[in-house]
Image (tube, helix red, strand yellow):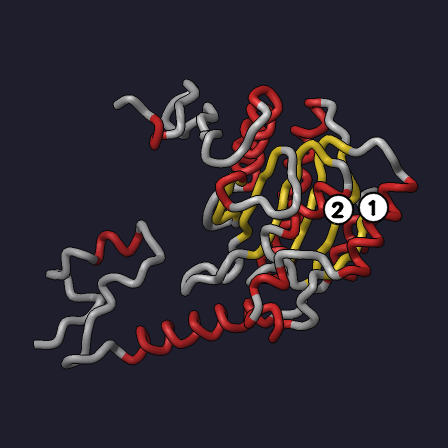
Amino acid sequence: MAHTPNDSTNPWLALRHLTPARIALGRTGTSLPTHAQLDFQFAHAQARDAVHLPFDHASLSAQLSERGRDSLLLHSAAADRHSYLQRPDLGRKLHDTSAQILRDYTHANPGGVDVAVVVADGLSALAVHRHTLPFLARMEEHIASDGWSMSPVVLVEQGRVAVADEIGELLGAKMVVMLIGERPGLSSPDSLGLYFTYAPKAGLTDAYRNCISNVRLEGLSYGMAAHRLAYLMREACRRQLSGVNLKDEAQVQTVETDTPRQNFLLSDQ
């Protein structure tokens, strides 16, 4: 007898309310039901579209300007999307022209900054379009409360994570924060990733960066992501490091209690 998702004997059904994961899909003979197969194909198409969606930097720059934020548009060494996907190394460094733009900017604005903010399309420009502005609003609250200076928002076409370190170095920044579209999943085509580096410079490996992932409405909230990032930035300034030696031990409020709790991964219990 073929089981369907509505079969009350299926013990997985209750879990479907707790996760977007593809569980308790049922079956028709030895195959998936038609609706489950079509849903999978739709999710796969959304993920592919997110990867190839062009970065609408002009719209983002205009919205930043409306909020009183200056921006700079740069390009990685990857000339186009095909090059970006085939040659990850090109997305990790700036095009020579863009590097010179930053040198000229730094020459005209000497002294460096505390925080350089970089936004790159990554593997999901959709994530950047949807989440950059609301997240920046929350992040800027923490930056202002700590009295840190902030660079113009640097927009990078065809950029990967490591390009932020080169940008931070050229800007003379104490810290750099990269907002980038993460690789789409079959239930999350618009997930935004945050990468933080203290004392950035070209050539650093992932061991020198901290990552906060899955920033989106269905994942980690803007407020919680900004809270965790602010903790990392303060600790990085105090300890003068980032990466594997800097753990997220931020105290957070929970729904069940007003008492702050530590990151459960670091709990003694």
User: What amino acid is found at the position of numbered circle 2 in the picture?
Assistant: Val
Q: Position of residue 54 (x, y in %)?
A: 66, 69
As drawn, the label of residue 11 is none
Which residue does the image show at 59% across and 59% down from the upper left?
A: 122
Please tell me which of labels 2 and 1 falls first in the chain. Answer: 1
Q: Residue furthest left?
A: 1
251 relative to 20 in the view: left or right: right
The answer to whether mark 2 and mark 1 are in CB contact below 8 A is: yes
| Element carrying mark 2 | strand
| Mark 1, residue position | 70
State which quadrant residue 236 falls in.
top right
Q: What's the CA distance linking mark 2 and mark 1?
A: 6 Å
How dense is the environment of label 1, judged by Cα within 10 Å: few (below 14), some, or many (20 and up)? some
Left or right: 68 in relation to 244: right
Residue in the picture at 81% in, 49% down: 102
> Which x, y percent locates residue 75?
73, 61
Which residue is situated farthest in the right direction here? Answer: 108
Q: Nearer the viewer, residue 45 or 13?
A: 45
Judge whether 100 appears above or below 174 on screen.
Answer: below
Measuring from the top left, give residue 25's x and y in whole percent. 24, 67
Residue type pointed to by label 1: Asp
